[in-house]
Image (spheres, rainbow, N blue to C red):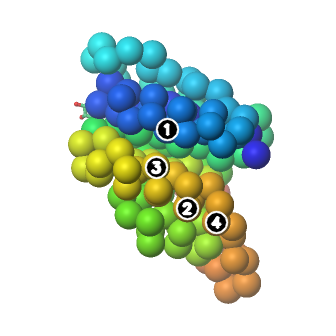
Amino acid sequence: MKIAIGSDHGGFALKEKIIKFLEENNYHYKDFGTYDAASVDYPDYALQVAEAIAQGDYDRGILVCGTGIGIGIAANKVPGIRAALCNDTFSARASREHNDANILTIGERVVGPGLALDIVKVWLESEFSGGRHSRRVEKIREIEEKYSK
Ligand code: RB5
């Protein structure tokens, strides 16, 4: 599984911890920045990671900002992206099993690093359940198509 990861300054410290976790667990990843704690704009990083997933260069994405909200809103503007804000492990599992989320967003200012790494682990190890959930994900795609004209 190829993972694209990014953050703004509000998520930078947690992104570095997640990268360490990915390395320790032999995940293949690319860090799209930001690369230090200087103030930046989260849509710039959301766009890079979301496009990398939408184009098929990477399988899954992880985006971190202060709350996980702004960076997820921006990522979800890219067609084909289903970014899910998960600040707990129940949501992380459900976002994969029910929504086939292809980007996980987390808020560094919301969850502690221990919980955040558990969320990442559960999210990466969970799979889409398909079945009735496929029909619902397809309806999300249809909404996207309706408004893409
Ligand atoms: C940056 O201060 C902060 O607004 C950002 O990290 C994020 O929380 C936005 O949703």
Query: Given contact means CB atoms under 8 Å apart, are the residues at marks 3 and 2 in contact?
Result: no
Asked which secondary structure carries label 2, the reply is helix
How far apart marks 1 and 3 lie (CA) works out to 7 Å
As drawn, which residue projects farthest toward the front? Answer: 24
Looking at the rendering, the quadrant in which ligand 1 lies is top left
Residue hosting label 1: 18
How far apart marks 3 and 2 lie (CA) works out to 9 Å
Q: Earlier in the sequence, mark 2 or mark 1?
A: 1
Residue hosting label 2: 122
Query: Given contact means CB atoms under 8 Å apart, are the residues at marks 4 and 2 in contact?
Result: yes
Residue hosting label 4: 126
- The disc labelled 3 sits on which kind of residue? Leu
Q: Position of residue 133 (x, y in %)?
A: 64, 79
Asked which secondary structure carries label 4, the reply is loop
Asked which secondary structure carries label 3, the reply is helix
Q: Earlier in the sequence, mark 4 or mark 3?
A: 3
- The disc labelled 2 sits on which kind of residue? Val
Residue hosting label 3: 117
Camera-nearest residue between 47 and 118: 118
